[in-house]
Amino acid sequence: MGTQLQDKKVAILVANGFEEVELTAPLEALKNAGAKVDIISPEKEKVKAWAEKDWGKDYPVDKNLAEANAQDYDALVLPGGVLNPDQLRINQQAVTFVGGFFEDGKPIAAICHGPWTLIETGELNGRRVTSYPSLKTDLENAGAVWSDEEVVTDHGLVTSRTPKDLPAFCKKMVEEIAEGEHVV
């Protein structure tokens, strides 16, 4: 196990229907770098993944969203999948939780449809991002500058398009979390 993130505590926020590999690959990368990771969800005990074309495995929830506080974490990861961020972006507790990371300049990593939740924070104006292509217009309407690249970084905000970008996403995510808070 690495020590690059030894003193870092990272939240992964998911609702039912997150893309399974977009949780498992970042989770493994974070743990391999030495981070302590909590899976946070509006669900209480377990949360169900989506595995490409059908339901995937259940994953234990470490902390219910109602009990979570952004100030207790050094960084946030938002996996995609269509169902997951669509639920999170209409959940005011989730939006407030995510907004807390922006307020404190803490790293946020969002992949695929994960940036949908970021839109609701109102913090994307002028920020460079990427995402699954179908979110381009939504992100641009929120003031973001969208680019079709495997990974885009803007002052600690790391975004990627699809699971095929996971190697670059995970590498950049770990790097930005190791750097710590970023002032915009």
Image (cartoon, helix red, strand yellow):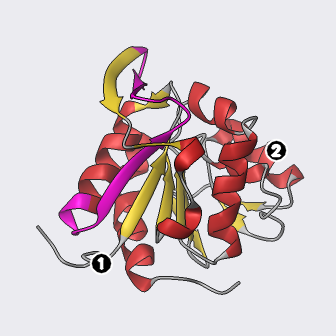
Does the magenta run of residues contain 32? Answer: yes
Range covered by the magenta-colored residues: 31-54
Viewport quadrant of the C terminus: bottom right
Q: Is residue 54 above or below residue 37?
A: above
The quadrant in which residue 129 appears is bottom right
Assign a secondary structure to mark 1.
loop
Q: Marks 1/2: CA distance?
A: 38 Å
Q: How far from the left and from the top, in percent, is residue 108? A: 55, 64
Q: Looking at the image, which residue sits at the far top?
A: 54
Q: Is residue 30 above or below residue 48?
A: below
Identified at 77% across, 56% down, the residue is: 121
Assign a secondary structure to mark 2.
helix
Answer whether residue 2 is visible to the viewer in this image: yes
Residue matched to label 1: 7
Viewport quadrant of the N terminus: bottom left
Q: How far from the left and from the top, in percent, is residue 54? A: 41, 12
Answer whether residue 51 is visible to the viewer in this image: no
The amino acid beneath tag 2 is Thr
Q: How far from the left and from the top, in percent, is residue 45? A: 39, 28
Point out which mark residue 146 bears. none
Identified at 65% across, 49% down, the residue is: 115
The amino acid beneath tag 1 is Asp
For disc 1, the neighbor class at 10 Å (few under 14, some 14 to 19, many from 20) is few
Residue matched to label 2: 137
The quadrant in which residue 98 appears is bottom right
Identified at 32% across, 30% down, the residue is: 59
For disc 2, the neighbor class at 10 Å (few under 14, some 14 to 19, many from 20) is few
Q: Earlier in the sequence, mark 1 or mark 2?
A: 1
Nearer to us in this view, 129 or 84: 84
Q: Is residue 58 left or right of residue 115?
A: left
Does the magenta run of residues contain 52? Answer: yes
